[in-house]
Amino acid sequence: MSRYLTSSKVGLLALISLYTESVVPSVATIPILSFLVSQILPINSMIPRSDVSLHSRDITVTLNDIQRATIDHISGIPGRSVWDLLLNKLWKINSFDALHVFFDTLSLLLQKTQEQLQNEPEDGLETDSNLNRMLLSRTSPLGAFVRRAQLEFTRLQFHDGLTLWKSFVVYRAPTLPQWRKRNQTAGNTSFDIILQQEQLGIADRLTEAVYRELGTEASQEVGNSTEDVEKLLEYQVDQMQRMGNRLPKAMKMKLLDMIESGVTVPSLSHYVSFLDSWKAGDYPSSFDKLHRYFDYTMHNRDRTFYQYALLNLAILHQDFGCYSEAVVAMQETISTARENNDMGCLNYSLSWLYHFGKAHPEQIHKVQEKGVLGTDREALAFLKAKAKETSMWTLLSTSLLSEAKLSLSNGDGAAQAFESILKASHLNVTRNVANAIGSQMSMQSSIYGRLGVSCQAWLYGELFLQCYASPSPVEDVVHCICKSAFLLSQKGRYEDAVARMEEVDEETLQTLRYSQYWKSSLGLMKFRRYLHCDNLTAADHVLAQLRAPLNLSQDLQFNISMLEVDLLTRRGDYSKAMEMLEHFATKLEDEEADIYQRVKLMTLKAQIYDASGTPQKGFSVALRAASLAHRARLLPALWEAVGRIGAILISLKEFSATTKLLESIMPQVLECEDCNLSAHTFSLLADAHVGMAGQAKAEGLQRKEQLTKALEHIERSFDEFSRIEDVRGQCEIMAKKATIMHLNGDPVLANDCAARYRDVTRATINQV
């Protein structure tokens, strides 16, 4: 097969030749030119962004495609469509010699150069066919395509030229019935005028000797040139690197068929195989294919691509869990990129090193001591400056979002984070950075979640999934879906959460990293549900599965650890739970740790003191957690810490102060749409009102009012616990309600509460 020319390109050349003959009407000019340009320009521009997997689009144009683009347009000749004229032109190429003549006359389609005009005789006359012909500019897309095709045909060896002719015969063969309608003399051997002149049939020995493969199955497929395969591979590499997905199975089979059809295998196919193996988690094969590709690259391009080999090696080491080797390889990448003055690779490497340091701070201390990055803010300022200099708008947008995330992590408040996000949003819109919109909206959703406005957090996630999912990386889509499912599970809508998780398609889950994140998020929701259902045995099994992946994100690892502490607390193993919290606290002593995680640890510590019967020990811890959460505007964490303070005040018999404190935050607690937080807050309010009733007179009106309010809060708390299926919470609330009924002297309602208590317990036993 030739390096460039294919039978489909001959069809496009015939259509271009027809266009220059001025037989295409003005109405059909734009549609036909649009069709030609869409097939001639590089594959990145001719394939829609939404068609990531290339399932429905081929790199070669068939005659059916050309027919659909031309058959509806009437030509300048009465009674003939553009397709009829094109069909006539295609069937006039009726021999191998006619194919040579066709390519030789392609130069007549182009404007002449100054040298050609000077060499022409002064009285030279043009033929009639050229007087009405519209000439193409030599630098236009159509002109460049014609010049390239003519040049490549002159370079063809005889065998390759004959292969092209046979491929064109097969390519044109389906249009024979249509050609017969216009030309009654056409027969089975009309594809070669020599066979017609000699009156040879398909079964003759000479015909079989020349066109022996025409009847085989291999001849039924239109051939592809080496350049077509290279363009397709480049497109796949671009999609796999930018979108983060794997090579689809259909495209993998298509590439194998192309390569096995006789096309020279480009070295880029090894890189595509490397990316596919890497995404699949097959690290030994990834190393082998990575070395194989860059061995070819080093041989052909010397050291100009050496830094990219090191860059890929560092990323592969990170996913493989070899963090020290990854840092060493990335440092070598930075040095080589500086030597070769490759600013794109250098900026990307520094950005990777910054994010690697945030994910694995224990591995980055040596790098910071050498002054490669400096502090986090210095590193981000450097990356923003370099991104502006080199017009790397995606890197600039990512750096702004990282700056917003750093502001949230350090507790600087939401104002600075919103400022950075708005800058990134303006950049994404003005510079058309479509693949960064997902990260931007995910960050906005996180900010609203930390501010306790869950409806806004949900809205931004839905807006991203509905409008911006297709041009965004797959990783952003998976994270957004998992976050939406988590918000649903907070409301107790577990079935809806699972349905949302199932929206991730199977091809996405073929990538190991996304599959681990998705399974861990789903397992985390199941783990929380089993804890609420008091099914601790099932929770143990899910926890063992959640501990298996090694490269989970810090957020998932933290949530798993906190639920493990909750599991130990529900079992009454308070000492071990406190040891785990102290162990995590030592890890988070660094000032760069996320302030949300530190506040969460303090709140859990105060909760364990309360559960162990010594709530007053956690007063200073809860007060400090509330102070940090208030300063950082972490409102859900603030309300949780205030709830812990309320529990301590109840133990000190400060019931009135507790009531005022909790009632003041109750509207904001409900706005968080967290059933667990709302249920515990209502329960504490009920305890405070019961305490105030105990301090009132035995038969006074005030006591009845307080008990009535307590019963209202108990009902609200029971409803919230029921939504998330928290069995212990429901049983505790029913026990409190039964106690109040006994105090009110109503044994019938007290027995009803006891019956509901038994029903909840029995339902739990049946589930287990």
Image (cartoon, grey):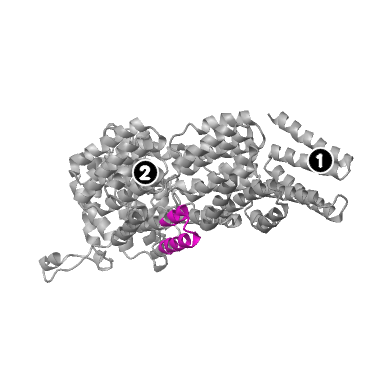
Magenta stretch in the rendered image: 403-427
State the residue at coordinates (47%, 52%).
Answer: 470
Assign the C terminus to one quadrant of the image: top right
Q: Please tell me the numbered disc located at residue 738.
A: 1
Relative to 200, does residue 384 appear above or below in the rendering? below
The kind of residue on which mark 1 rests is Ala
Does residue 586 belong to the magenta stretch? no
Does residue 412 belong to the magenta stretch? yes
Relative to 408, does residue 618 appear above or below in the rendering? above
Q: Badge 2 is on which residue?
A: 187
Assign the N terminus to one quadrant of the image: top left
Relative to 156, does residue 292 appear above or below in the rendering? above
Q: Is residue 511 visible?
A: no
Measured in 3D between alpha carbons, the distance from the residue under mark 1 to the one under mark 2, in whole angstroms, is 97 Å
Q: Secondary structure at mark 1?
A: helix
Is the residue marked by circle 1 packed among few (<14), some (14-19), or many (20+) residues within 10 Å?
Answer: many
Please tell me in which quadrant of the rendered image residue 588 appears. top left
Q: Please tell me the numbered disc located at residue 178.
A: none
Q: Position of residue 476 (x, y in %)?
A: 47, 49
State the residue at coordinates (26%, 39%).
Answer: 267
Viewer-nearest residue: 726 or 458? 726
Viewer-nearest residue: 643 or 151? 643
The kind of residue on which mark 2 rests is Gly
